[in-house]
Amino acid sequence: MQSDTEVRLALHDHGYRLTSPRWLVWSVLHDADGHLTAEEITARVNDYDPTVNRSSVYRSLTLFEELDLARRSQLGIDESARWEIIHPDDQFHLVCKRCGSVDHHIGDVVEQIKSHLNDDHGFSADTVDLVVTGICRTCGGI
Amino acid sequence: MQSDTEVRLALHDHGYRLTSPRWLVWSVLHDADGHLTAEEITARVNDYDPTVNRSSVYRSLTLFEELDLARRSQLGIDESARWEIIHPDDQFHLVCKRCGSVDHHIGDVVEQIKSHLNDDHGFSADTVDLVVTGICRTCGGI
DNA sequence: TTAAGTGCAAACGCTTTGCAGTTCA
DNA sequence: TGAACTGCAAAGCGTTTGCACTTAA
């Protein structure tokens, strides 16, 4: 568990309160370092407080998303959404088909795509959602 | 409507039959040039034959996906899946937030991403799912 | 004090499934 | 003839919502 200053301020700036369910959801997201489903988040929140309801978890997550504190992504067409705290450097997801690990890729690929589309095709890119599946270094044997 | 040779052969090669519902789903997909939801596909199929059921449409689509004849993609986190016939050149989707149009981008971006991940990070990329949202050339005014 | 937030249960929308009847090779 | 396929209706699943109660500021 960490200090609640960061979320409290972000919420307060927009007229929202820091409540117990919100704080628990935030803590779980933070400690997990990302990629949890809403169901997993609810389970972990309930380890601390079994009275917190699913719908409050969903409402908290949606609110964090609106405030650009958290991000929802679809890591597979058959899977439910996964949540993580936003880190500015995160570019996109690498999903290993073998071990199931999910990594963030850091680099300038997304920026390259944006400027390429803008310069060569007149498409002004806003969001870039990129999920790559394959075999990670560990599973592929160097 | 086009000749049914292509699908018939692909299905037959794997021991499946070309049935009326499957043929209708295929025709609709082909004529629409992609990006339909299962609901839209069902509606268009039902214009030709109102007795064809939703579940048959879903089963046909799933089968086409298994045979690499069609592709399912998630063009927005809140939207339902959309379907299209697979064209080898299609690289990724450009979704215009203003007019809602969906275009395929053709180029070497996806290959660049794959080789970059492989060479520099030891990640052997298999599938690349890339959805870019923004404002298209037409809506942005050249 | 009171607007904002919550738990609960029910509804929702898309998709899948079990089953009994039908059809194609 | 028999396995593949279908329509139907019901279930499944993740997520959202309406409402009466509670809580943070």
Image (cartoon, coloured by chain):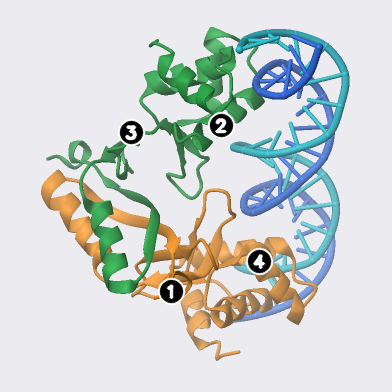
Chain colours: A orange, B green, C cyan, D blue
Please state the chain letter of the residue tagged with numbered disc 2 in the rendered image. B
Q: Disc 3 to disc 1, how far (Cα)?
A: 33 Å
Rendered image quadrant of residue A106: bottom left
Q: Spatial distance from mark 2 to mark 4, Cα to Cα?
A: 36 Å
- Residue B63 visible? The answer is yes
Q: Earlier in the sequence, mark 2 or mark 3?
A: 2
Side of A21 where A102 appears, left or right: left
Give A9 or C17, whichever is nearer the viewer.
Answer: C17
Q: Amino acid at mark 2?
A: Leu
Does mark 3 fall on the same chain as mark 2?
yes
Which type of secondary structure does the marked residue at label 3 adopt? loop
- Look at discs 2 and 4 and give the one toward the viewer: 2
**Gap between marks 2 and 3, in whole Å?**
17 Å
Q: Nearer the viewer, mark 3 or mark 1?
A: 1
Between A52 and A11, the residue placed more toward the observer is: A52
Q: Check residue B63 in the rendering and tell me which mark sits there, or answer none.
A: 2
Residue A79, position in %: x, y? 58, 53
Up the image or down, B127 lies above or below A19; here it is above
Residue with the mark numbered 3: B87
The residue singled out by tag 1 in the image is A141
Q: Chain of mark 3?
A: B
Dot in front, 4 or 1:
1
Which residue lies at the image location 19% right of the left edge and 36% below the top edge?
Answer: B138
Can you tell which mark lies on residue B124? none
Label 4 vs label 1: CA separation? 39 Å
Tell me the kind of residue under disc 1: Gly
**Cβ atoms at labels 2 and 1 below 8 Å apart:** no
Marks 2 and 4 belong to one chain: no
The spot of residue A131 in percent (x, y) is: 41, 58
